[in-house]
Image (cartoon, rainbow, N blue to C red):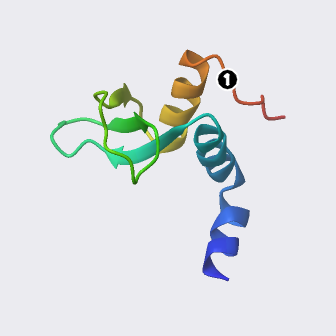
Amino acid sequence: MRRVMRRRERPEYWDSVHRLMDIGWYREGRDPSAPEAYWRFCQGHTRETISAPPRIIAAPDETTAMHLLLQELGHNPPVSD
């Protein structure tokens, strides 16, 4: 129930999470070693051994970082009305 409520409260965030997963990326969250808002993303699946370094995106929040990564990868998020 709690998960469903979170999705309803932040549909744009969860849509971006699922879009990244669909194209083989996952979020690691905020980079703890960075003094500013940098977000870490990895290609593959969380249970795989990571061979490539994570992609680090500077953005004020995680939703914006996911949108920027989707744009870089050529999977632009839909424009909201």
Residue nearer the viewer, 13 or 75: 75
Question: Where's residue 9, x and y in %?
Answer: 68, 63
Q: Secondary structure at mark 1?
A: loop
Q: Please, is residue 54 above or below residue 16 in the view?
A: above
Residue at 39% across, 54% down:
47
| Residue type at tag 1 | His
Q: For this view, does 11 lie left or right of residue 23?
A: right
Q: For this view, does 67 lie left or right of residue 48?
A: right
- In the rendered image, the residue lying farthest to the right is 81
Question: Where's residue 70, x and y in %?
Answer: 59, 26
The quadrant of the image that shows the C terminus is top right
Q: For this view, does 32 lie left or right of residue 22?
A: left
Question: Where's residue 75, x and y in %?
Answer: 67, 23
Q: Name the quadrant containing residue 16.
A: top right
Question: Where's residue 36, x and y in %?
Answer: 25, 35
Q: Name the quadrant containing residue 79.
A: top right
The quadrant of the image that shows the N terminus is bottom right
Report the number of discs: 1
| Residue annotated with mark 1 | 75
Badge 1: few (under 14), some or many (20 or more) residues near its Cα, within 10 Å?
A: some
Residue at 69% across, 47% down:
15
- In the rendered image, the residue lying farthest to the bottom is 1
Residue at 59% across, 43% down:
21
Residue at 62% across, 80% down:
2
